[in-house]
Amino acid sequence: MEKKIVKAAEYIKSQGIDTVETAIILGTGLGTMVKHIEVDREIPYKEIPHFPESTVEFHSGKLIYGKLEGKQVLVMNGRFHFYEGYSLQEVTFPIRVMKLLGVKNLFVSNAAGAINLALKPASLMIIDDHINMLPGNPLVGRNLDSFGPRFPDMSRPYDPEFIEKLETIAGEEGIEVARGVYIAWIGPSLETRAEYRLIKVMGADVVGMSTVPEVIVAVHQGMRVAAVSVVTDICDPDNLEPIVIEKILTNAAVAEKNLVKLFRRLVADV
Ligand code: HPA
């Protein structure tokens, strides 16, 4: 495993990518942030040794190295999901590689459904905790001691200072944000009404199919994490409408403008 991580990192470095402290993962339908990046290098995932290849149609699947607000960033445009058939180690392989590239801050976005009915479609929720309901944990197996401890603490997986900064930025920009709990559900089938009721009892505010594995690995290796969910649909079990993926993407696009504002200013501030 370590050898593969080293090989991938060496390839990326050989493409002219230097040490970079901040990385951003763009979620489903959230790729337009890329427009604001002054691009130095782009590397399709399929060129990188041992990188999984993106399969979801709206993901272009490449690593982008460039400047956002004058700061050097590494952007994953397109992420890997467990439901695509990758193992959780594969899903989080890029996060391991980031460690060897010097990444210290990881900013994550995702599309999610609102369990908490006070949330509005196309609004944003800053994640301050999560529940892992994927069938596994990316840290299962031999511990990578050079990356982090066997039993990493998860008392504050989302950096409290980043959360505060995001809330301040949102206030200054006039962007309404909530703060809450993200639960990772396996997918790819959407949840049933009974499952939404269960998820609510479990204490989640939003549900999605990503983010948690990457955050677990990032925290394992000592990175500071911030994550924001874009609310794309409302999961009200008593009035559940069939999900229309196009509608999810439309809501993602509306909320994305605000997400871009938050992340740009957070990047400028770290
Ligand atoms: N459930 C799971 N994942 C999602 C949803 C949802 O309702 N909306 C966007 N991603």
Image: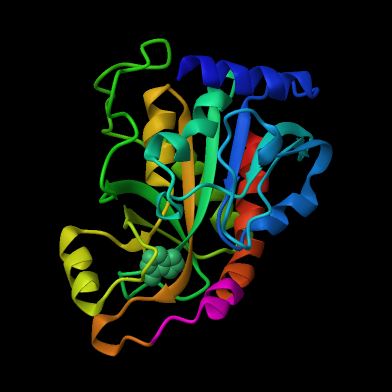
Camera-side residue: 269 or 46? 46
Provide residue 46's location: percent of width, then percent of height: 67, 39
In the image, residue 2 above or below residue 61: above
Provide residue 217's location: percent of width, then percent of height: 40, 31
Residue 156: name its quadrant.
top left
Q: Which residues are magenta?
A: 242-250
Count of numbered circles on the image: 0
In the image, residue 60 above or below residue 100: below
Provide residue 169's location: percent of width, then percent of height: 58, 50
Residue at 44 percent of width and 44 percent of height: 86
Residue at 71 percent of width and 35 percent of height: 47
In this view, which residue lies farthest toward the top?
146
Residue at 70 percent of width and 24 percent of height: 12
In the image, residue 233 above or below residue 21: below
Q: Quadrant of the N terminus?
A: top left
Find ligand 1 in the image and state its quadrant: bottom left
Residue at 64 percent of width and 36 percent of height: 269
Residue 200: name its quadrant.
bottom left
In the picture provided, is 151 more to the left or to the right than 235?
Answer: left
Q: Quadrant of the C terminus?
A: top right
Is 249 within the magenta? Answer: yes
Provide residue 106's location: percent of width, then percent of height: 53, 35
